[in-house]
Image: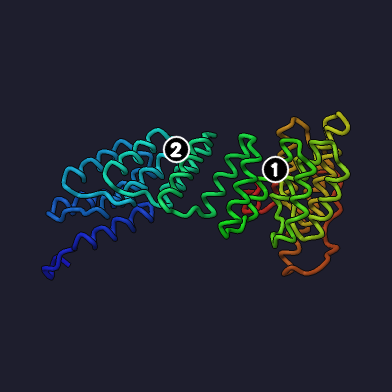
Amino acid sequence: MKEDDCYPTVRTYTVIIDALFENYRKFEAINLFNEMRNRGCEPNVHTHTVMIDAMCKERKFDESRRMLSEMMQKGLVPSVTTYNALIDGYCKEAMMESAQEILDLMNSNNCSPNEHTYNELICGFCKRKNVHKAMSLLSKMVEHRLTPNLVTYDSLIHGQCKVGHLDIASRLLEMMKENGLVPDQWIYSVFIDALCKNKRIEEARVLFNSLKDKGIKANEVIYTALIDGYCKAGMIDDADSLLEIMLTEGCLPNSSTYNALIDGLMVERGVMPDALTYTLFLDAYGCLGLLHQAFDVLKHMFDTGCDPSHHTYSFLIKHLSKKKLIKENNNAGELDLVPNVSFVDVADVWKTMEFETAMERF
């Protein structure tokens, strides 16, 4: 461009700097920012916003605040996006006092916060369990004629559930419905989990049973929340029944599901599960083709100090071999090619497992 006496504009520089940051080439982005200033091309509000946002993501808050001061000294007026970049950064690091300072600065400079500003602050305060402040921000949001969205209610309901304010969470749930918003799986999973943790199992069951009528398909998080609630209440038969429904519906259990069932058996029997118990779970997951969950069982064994037996490793070899053979035979149906493994050493597991599979598991 320079050879043709055509020099980059501030917009050109800004777009390239933003793209460099997006592609994790921060040193090149900073050098280009310095170059544009050295060449007499003054950064505008958008350029400074890009830089401030990038520095906040790097947790360089002192530098980002200095840049904010510099741009204001030059007569540039920060936009709501500029302030939001700082608020986002502070909220993600749970620095809520600093985030509040930026909100106050916005107001003093006659820059009106938008929905994104309030959502970040509400989420941040809820994570710090300061739900009173979060609710006051909701009130201010409505006062300024801003419409709370799904993200707003997600944060508030989760926050209220975390501190045990289930009645307030329930009112928020009704409020969002009145405003035409449809609660998603995440909200219901949080609510069901909170009901179970507060020993309101029957209410959790009723809410779960109502999901189909609401057009909500239960996912593994919702199933696991209720299964865990049943197990902690000693309702093992109900947990088993729900697990069967979960599998029938084609919803695959995750590691938290089996952890809940293991813990439930411990509560019911008053004993720690032994290698045989874990191995039976491991084999069951392997037979269903759920090798991720099978390896989660193995990791849980290590975590609890329960040494896997030769049978544990034998089952792993069997299921890994079956997966490998099916893959090599282009996903053919049932194969009787799996070797009859009886006693193996742990090293044989890693010999059988492909490197990519090992990296996925651990």
Q: In what element is the residue under mark 1?
A: helix
- Who's the residue at 54% across and 54% down the image? 150
Residue position for label 1: 193
Count how many numbered circles sit on residues in the image: 2
Label 2 packing within 10 angstroms: few (<14), some (14-19), many (20+):
some
Q: Which mark is residue 93?
A: 2
Name above or below for residue 99 compared with residue 205: above
Image check: 273 left or right of 354?
right
Name above or below for residue 118 compared with residue 97: below
The quadrant in which residue 302 appears is top right
Q: In what element is the residue under mark 2?
A: loop
Eye-nearest disc, 2 or 1: 1
- Who's the residue at 75% across and 55% down the image? 210
Which quadrant does the C terminus fall into?
Answer: top right
Tell me the amino acid under the disc marked 2.
Answer: Glu
Label 1 packing within 10 angstroms: few (<14), some (14-19), many (20+):
many
Distance between mark 2 and mark 1 Cα atoms: 26 Å
Image check: 97 left or right of 138?
left
Residue 185 in percent (x, y) is at 65, 54
34 vs 212, nearest the viewer:
212
Tell me the amino acid under the disc marked 1.
Answer: Asp
Q: Which mark is residue 29?
A: none
- Who's the residue at 62% across and 43% down the image? 169
